[in-house]
Every structure is written in structure tokens, then in C-alpha cells.
Amino acid sequence: MKKRRKANTAFRHTGAFWLFVLPSLGLFALFFLLPLVLSIWFSFTDFDGWKKMNFIGLKNYTKILKDSSFYLSLGRTFIYTIVNLPFKVAIPLLLAALVTSKKLKGNTAVRTMIYIPVLFSSLVAGITINWMFSQEYGLVNFLLEKMGMTPLEWSLNPTLATVVISVASNWVSAGYYMLLYVGGINNISKELYEAASIDGSGKVNTFFHITVPLLLPTTFIVLLLSTVNLLKEYALIQGITLGGPGTSTTYIVQYIFSQGFDQYKYGYASAAGVLVSIVFIVIAAIQFKMTKGGGEV
Amino acid sequence: MKTSKHLGSTIAITVLGFVIALIIFFPIIWLTFSSFKPRAELFAYPLHLLPSKFNFDYYGSVVNDGLFVYMKNSLFLAVVGTLITVLISASCGYALAIYRKEIPYVNKVFAVFLLGTLIPGEILTIAQFTVVTDIGLYNNIWGCILPVVTTTTGIFMYRQHYMSIPLALAESARIDGASEFMIFRKIMLPLGYSVTVTLTIFSFMWRWNDYILPLMLLSDQSKFTIQIAIKSYIGTMAVDWSSILAASVLSIVPVIVLYMILQKYITGGLAATGVKG
């Protein structure tokens, strides 16, 4: 009797479990898992998004692997990511150290001002920073000229255009990562700092020898999140260079979109997407392995 | 001696803090003041911080262009999207936490959702676009809502939260005769309050700022969201800066207002979830 009752309740809870999970799972299956499978399927076809859809085997893949513009945009994306990663970690870390200092008066005001850019859409963040750096009548060039320097060609020079995009990307994310670091700093025991100060350790020394090492788990999260976000940078650039000058700031997501939506090569673009996904997963796996190697997370 | 040194460093740190905060905040001030400058002043040296007089012409013209319609569309996307996200994430995260001991495959279901964090949605946009079009939601705001409401982050936040609540709480409610749905609705959902507030502001912000799907899916101008409307001012031939500036300033007002209202909750909430995540 008792056993039977238990079986019944277990059945009841299985039903409840699926009912609770179903809305999320159903939408996830329809709009994530299905597109995932479709992407792989499209990648073996010449699908044009409309009528044509023939199986063409690995043709898309062999074509992409011979396409220099694929390698160029992927390479550009990597360089952009690698150059920006140190800033994505260092700036929020220093900001967090600043706003958690007991000596900072008006803490809330400072935090709020640093955090507000996080609320901006990537597009509007791009526009906001681009407006500062606009080549003619931009504030930065105006100030450079006032200081007796030559104004810079922010939108004509590929390197300078990348600098503007990088500034915008850091500007819109710094406050968010700062908050992650603030959380990490608040979790460090106060006694550790007291002990360090009794032992005569200075502020700078304490920061580098206690705070930074103990924040390693947070740093790994920041690295992981910012790597993915840098690799897939797209909307921000639509507010700044649109991928130019030429194609010098066309990164991989824009490459896929232009193949797919502008040139109606859905199959080809899907194959590029599959290849890029593999690259993303490998990078995430390497970072995850390194995280475990750090032994902290 | 020691107190004066202490006072000195307090002043130094505080000044440094405000200088840095102002540098970071300054582009917003510059954007806002620029949006009130007449075009002649916008493109003439020397530049001044303040407009010679506050000119609302471009605000008037973007509103005439339908800016409030676009903002209304964005508001619908953000509010409805957030409501759905909070409800389905709460129930899903709750179930993944509360039945973890009695149903053996719960963690396998959770692992399926974790797949969502592995591949960025941007990569799947083309296939997503095909699915949305095939179910008849092209040029329909629901086509921009349904694909993005499931968020692994949201499910994860609720799951973590409910795992910290003793299972005995649900058990005793069951003994009192409460149904599983009642337990969730009457006891557990209110207990998830802190996660709900955090997820609400984040989801609202994500949806308000959504760009790629609305750009690909919405073709009627009357259905545009605010982001797409702003993008449409960046023409291929000429960039209409005055309209872009005014529309950009208006576009950030709702998110900042919501942030200001809920600010005191998110600092703690986000920091905690972020580090545990």
C-alpha cells in the first residue's frame, strides 16, 4: 500500500516537472535546437533562402576554405579580440578597486556614472563614441588641434577605426565587468587585509599580491564572457564604421550576414557559421581547461 | 599627523574617482548637449559644450517621423518579452532545482539548456530567420519575441536560487495538501523575488536593445523598433546626425529610468549571481 502511494506521487511529480519545464524547453527546441540542426543541414545545400535547395555535399566547405575574405575576416576578428582582452580585464579590475576603496566618498554616484553606459544598446554605444571621434567636427580631433597636434583620420585609417570600435566596446562593457569584480572583492575576507597591513604591506603591494590572485575566478569569468562577446562583435560596428574603411573592420559575424542576407547564399553562410561555431567551441574549451588548470573555479 | 595623511588620501582618491567617472560619463553628456544644437553649430569650429540655445527642432522632427511609434513597439517587445522570460525561467529553474533528488534525469534536461551558452545566437540567425518565417511570423513583433525569451542565464539564476531553499519547505506544503502548482505559485515564486527583480531589469534591457532579429524580420516601417529606426538614419549615402543624436538620447531614457528605480536591488543581485556563475 505504502509503496503504491509513493509510486503515484512520483508519477504526479514527473508530470509537474515536465509542465514546469515545457514552455522553456519547447521554445528552446523550436528556436535554438531546430535552427542548430537546420544550420548544419543548410550547410550541405545550395539553399538561397527561397526556392533552391539541392544537396551539394561538402562544396560550401571547400569553397569557404579557399575564400581569402573568410580567412581575412576571421583573422581580423582574432586580432581584435586578443588586443582588447587585456583592457577588458584591467580596466574593470582597476575601477572595482577604486569604487570599493573606503576612502572614496560619493561611492554611489561614481558607480552609477561608470555603470550607465552598460545600459546602452551596442548600436547606440557605437554611435555615442563615434560622435566623439568623428573626423570632422568631432570633439577628440578638436581637442587634439587645440593642443597643437594634427587631427587624426579616425574613419579613413583602418587602425584608428579599430581603435574607435575598441574604445566603444570597452566603454559599454567596463561597468558590467566592474560589478563582477566588486562582487569578488567583497567576498575576500577582511582579516586577510588586516593581516597584510599589520605585516607592513603597502596598498599597492596588497593589491597585486592579495586582491589580484584571489580574484582569479572572477577574472576567468570576465575573460570567458569578453572573449565570446568580442568574437561576435557586430551591432556596435553598425553604429561606427559599418565594417569599413573597405573591409578593414568587417568581423566574422558581419561576413556571415553579408554572405547570407545580402547575397542570398544561405547554404554557404550556414557552412561558414558551422565552421565558426567549431572555432568558438574550441576556444571556449581551451579557456575552460585553463580555468580548471588554475584550480579556482 | 596620521589623520591629516588619512584626510589627504581620502581627498585624493575621491577626486580621482570623480575624474574617472566623469571621463566615462562624458560621452553621454556630449551626446545629449549636441542633440540640442542647431545643425550649423554642430558642424562649426570652435566647438562648445553647451548649445547657444536649447533647440528642440530635431526632437520634433524625429517624433514626427514616428519615433514614439517605434518606442511603443520596443516597449511591447521589452515588456511582453520580459514577462514571458521571467515566468518560464522561474518555473523551469524551479523545477530543475526542486525535483533534482526525486527525478533522475533532471540534470540531463538542464544540460540541454547549457547547450544554449555554447553557440552564440548570432551564428544561428539565418536558420532562426527561416524558422520564424516558416511559422508565419515574418514582419511580426512576435517573431522577434519568441526566439529570444528562453535564456539559460535566467533559468540558471532561478535554479541556483531554489537549490538554496530547503526541500522540506515544499514537502511540508505537500503534506498540507497543496498541489505542485500551488506550491510554486504561492510559496516559491514570492521567494524568488530577488532573482525576479534582477532578471526583469536585465531582460528589459536586452529586449529594448535587441538589434539583429528585429533588423532582419521587421520590414514595415510602422513595425520598426527604436534600434532599427535609429539604424535607418545611418544611410548609405549620408548620415543624418541631428536625427541620430536626438533619437539616440530618447532611446536610452526608458532603460535609465528603469535602472534608477531598480538600481538598489541589482548591484547586490548581479554581483552575487555573476561570481557564483
Image (cartoon, grey):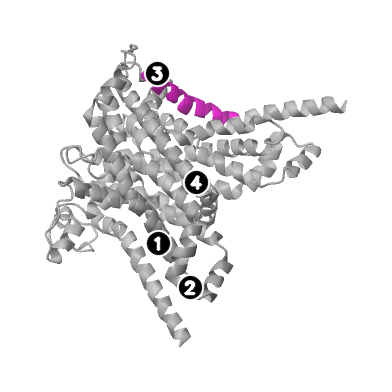
Q: Earlier in the sequence, mark 3 or mark 4?
A: 3
The magenta segment is A22-42
Residue at the spot of label 4:
A293
Classify residue B107 by image quadrant: top right
Classify residue B43 by image quadrant: bottom left
Residue at the spot of label 1:
A94
Label 4 neighbourhood size at 10 Å, few (<14), some (14-19), many (20+)? few
**Residue placed most toward the observer, B176 or A21:** A21
**CA gap, disc 3 to disc 1?**
46 Å
Asked if labels 4 and 2 share a chain, the reply is: yes
Q: Is residue B127 left or right of residue B65?
A: right
Q: Chain of mark 4?
A: A
- Amino acid type at circle 2 is Ser
Contact (Cβ within 8 Å) of mark 3 with mark 1: no
**Residue placed most toward the observer, B182 or A250:** A250
- Amino acid type at circle 1 is Leu
Looking at the picture, how far across and down is residue A251, in whole percent?
28, 37
